Each structure stands twice: as C-alpha cells, then as structure tokens.
Image (cartoon, rainbow, N blue to C red):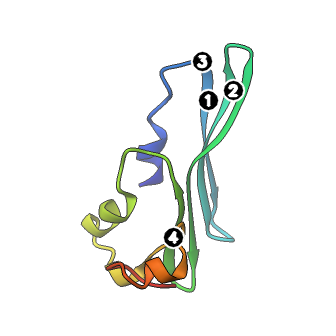
Amino acid sequence: MNESYAENKPAYGDIEVETIFDTQRNHYQIVHLGWHHNRWVHHCVMHLDIRNEKIWIFYNSTEHDIAADLVSLGVPKQDIVLGFYPLFMREMSDYAVG
C-alpha cells in the first residue's frame, strides 16, 4: 500500500520520493527530498509503524485517509492506531487506542 502512495511525485521542484521500509523493525515512511528553487526540501509524507501487532499511523500529509484505506483492504479497525492523536482523542475514535 505504501508504494502506491509513493507514486505521487510533487509537481514542483526537483523532488525525489523515497520509500523507507525497515521490515526488521517495522518502520515505514515516505519522504520527499530535493530542491525547490534554492531551498532544500526534506519532508516526511507518511510514517507508519507496526507495534504490538497493530498498525500505528504517526503522520499522514497525503490527501488519502490511510486508516480508511487499510480498513478497505481488510484490516480491522481494532488493529489500527491513530498515533498522531493524543490518548484521550484515540479513546473516542472507532480505532484502537494503542
């Protein structure tokens, strides 16, 4: 799934899209890096981890609802943690608390 998000290259600058998949430690990121005009760009687009058999979404700056995409792929909501929200907000969501 992460690779399909990595296909979206920015329309500006000389920007590369890097996928960082650490399958031993279960860390997954998509990063934009390069130059836009005279400015260096280094931006995390998406950051997911697998911790305690749950998918933690730590960051998402895409236009996609990654949690909903995971559910549509068959991942139960109780196996997805919205890690970018504080605990009290996660307790009010339909997803796992963590």
- CB atoms at circles 1 and 2 under 8 Å apart? yes
Q: Position of residue 39 (x, y in %)?
A: 73, 21
Instruction: Determine the secondary structure under disc 2.
Output: strand
**Above or below, 30 relative to 27:** above
Q: Amino acid at mark 1?
A: Glu
Residue that numbered label 2 is attached to:
34
Q: Label 3 belongs to which residue?
A: 13
Q: CA distance from mark 3 to mark 4?
A: 31 Å
For marks 3 and 4 on the same chain, the one whose residue lies earlier in the sequence: 3
Amino acid carrying label 4: it is Tyr
- Element at label 4: loop
The answer for how far apart the CA atoms under marks 3 and 2 are is: 8 Å
Helix, strand or loop status at disc 3: loop
Query: Label 2 is placed on what type of residue?
Result: Gly
Q: Is residue 30 left or right of residue 92?
A: right
Q: CA distance from mark 1 to mark 2?
A: 6 Å
Q: Tell whether label 2 touches label 3 (CB within 8 Å).
A: yes
Distance in Å between CA atoms under marks 1 and 4: 29 Å
Whole-percent x, y for residue 51 in the image: 58, 80
Q: Is residue 93 above or below residue 68?
A: below
Residue located 53% across and 71% down the image: 83
Q: Quadrant of residue 36?
A: top right
Labels 3 and 2: the sequence-earlier one = 3
* Residue drawn at point x = 45 percent, y = 79 percent: 90
Query: Which mark, residue 63?
Result: none
Which marked residue is nearer to the observer: mark 1 or mark 4?
Answer: 4
